[in-house]
Image: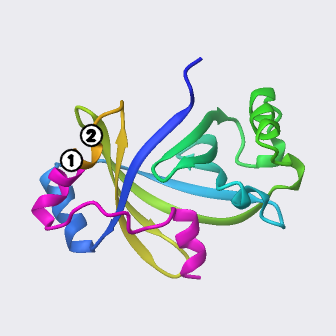
């Protein structure tokens, strides 16, 4: 089985830069996704540099477990489920993922949710995601460069950023961390 790895570069940008990227890459289609994140009362998932979420896109529910491997790489376990209520999940594979990473399933509670308008463009080496995320008290604009395979992603991403006079320097924590930082 292939290792469940997600590798991505992320950068927060200004609204006008987001509008330029959307226009430049002809990003006229988007998905609305609501993300509900879970943790235990004593933040066991956060302590493992992880995240547990259910993402809702239309009538689709996707369970995700992410555990950080390094600054731009995560182990990512993902599977479609038939409910947005985490505690109603009975899927043995998902329960095994949580157990393997020592995450107590029955202690998980919803801790934050937010909505993202996501534009995507498949590029040769990666997927470019332009995210406009609405939190309870603010909106932010993030570009993600999600690797399809190993390559010099920073050079490619910098070519995308060059017209808006930016260079990739990690300038943002995860969306879940940003949801807490601005509340």
- The secondary element bearing badge 1 is classed as helix
Question: Where 63 falls versus 166 (above or below)?
Answer: above
Label 2, label 1: how many angstroms apart (C-alpha)?
A: 6 Å
Instruction: Name the residue located 29 percent from the left edge and 34 percent from the top edge.
Output: 151
Quadrant hosting residue 45: bottom right
Q: Quadrant of the N terminus?
A: top right
Examine the structure image and report whether residue 166 is included in the region drawn in magenta. yes
**2 and 1 marks in contact (CB < 8 Å):** yes
The one nearer the camera, 87 or 57, is 87
Instruction: Name the residue located 51 percent from the left edge and 63 percent from the top edge.
Output: 175
Instruction: Name the residue located 70 percent from the left edge and 48 percent from the top edge.
Output: 84
Q: Which mark is residue 167?
A: none
Q: Residues within 10 Å of mark 1 (few under 14, many from 20)?
A: few
The one nearer the camera, 78 or 89, is 78
Q: Which residue is mark 1?
A: 155
Percent across and percent down for residue 44 are 79, 58
Q: Quadrant of the C terminus?
A: bottom right
Percent across and percent down for residue 91 are 78, 30
Q: Is residue 108 left or right of residue 17?
A: right
Question: Where 139 falls versus 153 (above or below)?
Answer: below
- The secondary element bearing badge 2 is classed as loop
Question: Where 179 falls versus 163 (above or below)?
Answer: below
Quadrant hosting residue 163: bottom left
Q: Which mark is residue 152?
A: 2
Instruction: Name the residue located 73 percent from the left edge and 60 percent from the top edge.
Output: 47
**Range of magenta residues:** 157-183
Residue 17 visible in the snapshot: yes
Q: Residue furthest top?
A: 1
Examine the structure image and report whether residue 79 is included in the region drawn in magenta. no
Q: Residues within 10 Å of mark 2 (few under 14, many from 20)?
A: few
Quadrant hosting residue 10: bottom left
């Amino acid at each position: 089985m292939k290792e469940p790895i997600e590798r991505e570069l992320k950068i927060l940008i200004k609204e006008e830069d987001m509008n330029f990227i959307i226009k430049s890459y002809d990003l006229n289609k988007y998905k609305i996704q609501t993300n509900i994140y879970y943790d235990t009362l004593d933040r066991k998932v956060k302590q493992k540099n992880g995240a547990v979420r259910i993402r809702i896109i239309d009538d689709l529910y996707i369970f995700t477990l992410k555990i950080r491997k390094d600054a731009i790489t995560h182990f990512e376990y993902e599977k479609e489920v038939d409910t947005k209520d985490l505690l109603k999940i009975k899927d043995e594979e998902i329960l095994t993922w949580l157990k393997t990473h020592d995450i107590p399933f029955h202690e998980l509670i919803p801790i934050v949710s937010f909505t993202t308008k996501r534009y995507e463009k498949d590029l040769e080496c990666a997927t470019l995601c332009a995210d406009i995320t609405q939190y309870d008290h603010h909106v932010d604009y993030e570009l993600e460069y999600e690797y399809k395979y190993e390559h010099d992603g920073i050079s490619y991403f910098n070519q995308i950023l060059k017209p808006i006079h930016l260079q990739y320097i990690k300038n943002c924590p995860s969306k879940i961390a940003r949801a807490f930082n601005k509340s």
